[in-house]
Image: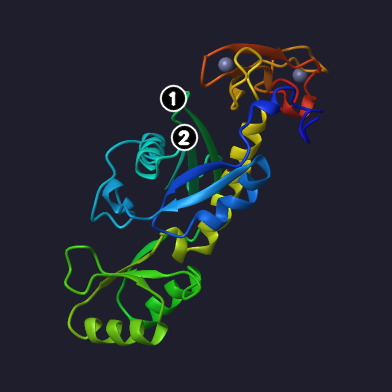
Amino acid sequence: MSAYSTHHQHIEVLPREQRVAFLTCHDKVRLVTEALAPLGFYVDAISSYDTDHFGTFSREVERRGSAHDTALEKARLACSLGGARYGLGSEGSFGRDPHLGWMPWDYEILCLWDDHLQYPIFAVAGSGATNYAQAEVDSLQAADAFMQRVRFPEHALILGRPAEPWFRKGVRDPDWLREQLQWLLARQPKVWLETDMRAHLNPLRQGVIREAAEQLAKHLKSCCPSCQAPGFVVVRSEPGLLCSSCGLSTPLATAHIRECPACRHQERSTVTRLANPGNCEHCNP
Ligand SMILES: [Zn+2]
Ligand SMILES: [Zn+2]
């Protein structure tokens, strides 16, 4: 009996001691190893390829596809560069929070590509715990306030814009930065500062990547009842769960649809309980 067989009947098809090639320049291997090692995956960094070709946060290189597409492209490239059955790609993106829509939000995507069965498994983690920010400062005081807000120097900064001669990424030395700012602000009214979001310089992002890896491990433990491939997870939910008080439908999920990313087999499971009136638009408008 495997360790997971109580929850997942088909776990024995998961490979043992399989190598995963991870395309990363930014020291992310340690962030995913803990989650993937118990499943028998050994993560091996492929650092010979400059992932900045896929786009940079600081916009010297624009990302061409969506974050999902980019993660998949990286995972497939990792397979071919690393000569491994499994390839891992990671991509972060920063947008607005899904609740109120005005807080900065960090989305971290991991994609595991199985080159043998030719299909991807995606995992996503999102968090409002991000220091993603930009500012145009006109004084040392304003710069200091920004540095404090974005947790510099624990998190690195970028000085200037890509086209400016003083553009510098990965700034971690407060004395050096203040000296540069003093010199620049004596010659021009404003200087651009922004957070360096590369994972190795951003501990907050590292935490969200760890969460995505845990999510990926969960997905890997759930196997398709039809073809036994790992990654059989909920791909969408149908709203309309009935209210326990008035009997009308609520925005809560009344059914979940699971789909196999390898053979596309689907299963629909209905939620058997009723919704709390607190979630009902009629009872609790
Ligand atoms: Zn399947
Ligand atoms: Zn109701």
Disc ID at residue 156 = none
Residue 214 horizontal side relative to residue 167, left or right: right
Disc ID at residue 118 = 1
Residue 199 horizontal side relative to residue 246, left or right: left
Residue 177 horizontal side relative to residue 7, left or right: left
Q: Is residue 248 above or below residue 56?
A: above
Residue 163 horizontal side relative to residue 79, left or right: left
Q: Is 114 or 156 nearer to us in this picture?
A: 114
Crowding at mark 2 (Cα within 10 Å: few <14, some 14-19, many 20+): some
Q: Quadrant of residue 123?
A: top right
Asked which secondary structure carries label 1, the reply is loop
Mark closest to the chain's N terminus, 2 or 1: 2
Residue 129 shows up from this direction: no
Q: Which residue is mark 2?
A: 85
Q: Residue at x 57, y 44 (%)?
A: 212
Q: Residue at x 29, y 49 (%)?
A: 55
Estimate the x, y position of residue 265 in percent, counting from the top left.
57, 12
Q: Is 2 or 230 nearer to us in this picture?
A: 2
Say which quadrant the C terminus sits in: top right
Q: Is 30 or 94 nearer to us in this picture?
A: 30
Report the Cα–Cα distance between label 2 and label 1. Answer: 9 Å
